[in-house]
Image (tube, rainbow, N blue to C red):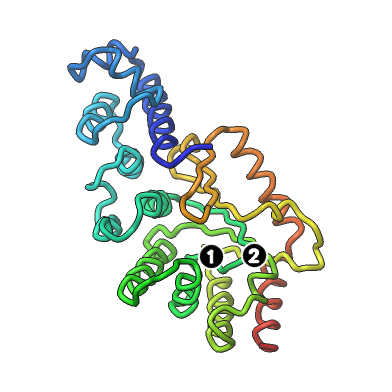
Amino acid sequence: MQNGPAVRRRKLGAELRALRTRAGLTSGEAARLVGWHQSKVSRIETGASGVKPDDLRLLLDAYEVRDRHLRELLLILAGSEDAGGPNRWWHAYRGVLPPTYRDYISLESQASAMRTLETTVVPGLLQTAEYARAVTRAAVNDLSEDRLDVLVEVRLARQDVLRSQHPLKLCAVLDEAVLRREVGGPEVMARQLERLCEAARLPQVRLQILPFTAGAHVGLTGPFVIFSFPSTSDLDVVVLDQLTSSLYLERKEDLMAYSEAFDSLQSHALSPEDSLDYIAGIGDGA
């Protein structure tokens, strides 16, 4: 279990090693192509050291990597402030958002799919502004109104990944407690339930409810997110949110375990159609 930067270094190194092998080059040959010592290539590939964005571009050119999306993703993993094109909006909030949150947003912006279990609150990508304000105010102590406004603004800006030309595919399983917990008052909650119904009808969103009647389940250990990326599955990662930071799980065994857990949760949850009716029914009774 590691922090974001360490995970990104190792994942970036592993992907660069795979790209070099695919290009038919040894580490020594790759080093000569870009004018480095072989040990530098080895340190980057093992994750022992990071790689500067300009150096990464040299390697990608040497390996003849033309896939634009893959190049942008790898540049983001390298910490490039220029990667992501017009989608790098979060860089404007460097002085406000902690690095771990910016890491999370950068991964979210480049992912092709996201699987998430939520046991307490509505996922950020599906929150209304009022709901996001109430959740943020409760989660962060002594928050000024100006900073609260910025954090809500960021939360809403993140939701653009669901409306882009190639939208993120979101699969979400929500414990019934998420629907029953009154956040921000009855009117705010009623509008939030309406938003969930709207989101559930989007083709890129699969929303399922895990009712109380499902009893004990593997998700009782806590919420999690699994990000999947285009072009390669070796960059997939599990994210566990903590109170003051995020933890990242990168090992194949961890990814397999959480993927199997998510499959199990989906099988115990209501179907998307029944879930939509369930949400609407709670909203009508609110």
Residue sitting at x 37%, y 68%: 151
Residue sitting at x 50%, y 72%: 138
Name the side, left or right, on which 272 lies relative to 57: right
Residue 284, horizontal then vertical, whole percent: 67, 88
SS at circle 1 = loop
Question: For residue 38, which quarter of the picture?
Answer: top left
Residue 127, horizontal then vertical, whole percent: 49, 72
Mark 2 = which residue? 174
Dot 2 crowding, Cα within 10 Å, few <14, some 14–19, many 20+: many
**Tag 2: amino acid:** Leu
Residue sitting at x 34%, y 24%: 44
User: Looking at the image, is mark 1 or mark 2 earlier in the sequence?
Assistant: 1
Residue 196, horizontal then vertical, whole percent: 57, 74
Name the side, left or right, on which 145 lies relative to 57: right
Mark 1 = which residue? 123
SS at circle 2 = strand
Residue 211, horizontal then vertical, whole percent: 75, 68
Residue sitting at x 29%, y 25%: 63
Task: Classify the position of the N terminus by image quarter.
Answer: top right
Are the residues flagged by discs 1 and 2 in contact, CB closer than 8 Å? yes
Name the side, left or right, on which 11 lies relative to 146: right
Dot 1 crowding, Cα within 10 Å, few <14, some 14–19, many 20+: some
Q: CA distance from mark 1 to mark 2?
A: 9 Å
Task: Classify the position of the C terminus by image quarter.
Answer: bottom right
Mark number for residue 187? Answer: none
Depth check: 261 or 241 in front?
A: 241
